[in-house]
């Protein structure tokens, strides 16, 4: 599967928008071939309120396109910002210590109007947000998500 790794630079939201649209359209083309659950996960380098993430979550169209993915963190933890890049982590370099913490890592589940609801989000939580034997896993905290198979539609 191709990797969607957007530009990390703070001022590069336009590039992240273009990259998001291209990645989402590519995924749509692949998913048209068979009705499966689609999960997009990773470091998106964008806050939840950015245009690129608003696009992924169906809150904003970009370049005449729209998609809708459920943000697993938001679904499971609606009142928690879920910071994944923060100075609480000592691996965050000194250059980045001047910006506020942010959530830039995501697990996104394609919404059921695109395909049969093959899965639902059961939970989402951070991981690697503490050192193990004094060692941090990354400069980002990770996310993990539990999905449940959706119950089949029953005839009325």
Image (tube, grey):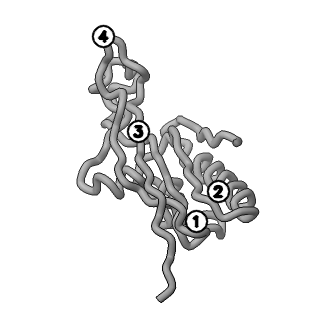
Q: Which mark is residue 67?
A: 1
- Mark 3 — residue? 143
Which badge, 1 or 4, comes first in the chain's sequence?
A: 1
Give me the C-alpha separation between circle 2 and circle 3.
21 Å
Instruction: State which mark lies toward you, 3 or 1.
Output: 3
Q: Residue at 53%, 54% (x, y): give it.
A: 52
Residue designated by label 4:
134
29 lies left or right of 11: right
Gap in Å between the C-alphas at discs 2 and 1?
7 Å
Comparing labels 1 and 4, the label whose residue is closer to the camera? 4
- Identify the mark nearer the N-term, 3 or 1: 1
Find the distance from the CA under tag 3 to the CA under tag 1.
22 Å
Residue at disc 3, secondary structure: strand
- 117 sits to left or right of 24: left
Residue 91 visible in the snapshot: yes
- Residue 145: horizontal and vertical position, in percent? 41, 45
Up/down of 146 relative to 62, above or below: above
Q: Nearer the viewer, mark 2 or mark 3?
A: 3
User: Residue 8's quadrant in the figure?
Assistant: top right
Q: CA distance from mark 4 to mark 3?
A: 20 Å
Residue under label 2, please give it: 24
Q: Are marks 2 and 1 in contact (CB under 8 Å)?
A: yes
Dot 4: element: loop
Task: Give the residue drawn at x 70%, y 42%.
Answer: 1
Residue 82 image-quadrant placement = top left
């Amino acid at each position: 599967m191709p990797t969607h790794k957007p530009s990390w630079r703070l001022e590069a939201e336009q590039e992240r928008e273009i990259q998001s649209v291209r990645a989402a359209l590519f995924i749509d083309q692949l998913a048209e071939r068979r009705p499966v659950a689609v999960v997009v996960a990773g470091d998106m380098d964008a806050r939840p309120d950015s245009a690129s993430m608003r696009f992924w979550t169906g809150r904003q169209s970009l370049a005449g396109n729209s998609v809708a993915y459920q943000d697993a963190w938001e679904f499971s933890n609606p009142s928690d910002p879920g910071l994944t890049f923060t100075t609480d982590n000592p691996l965050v370099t000194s250059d980045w210590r001047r910006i506020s913490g942010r959530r830039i890592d995501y697990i996104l589940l394609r919404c059921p109007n695109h395909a049969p609801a093959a899965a639902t989000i059961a939970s989402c939580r951070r991981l690697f947000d503490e050192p193990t034997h004094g060692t941090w896993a990354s400069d980002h905290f990770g996310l993990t998500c539990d999905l449940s198979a959706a119950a089949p539609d029953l005839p009325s």
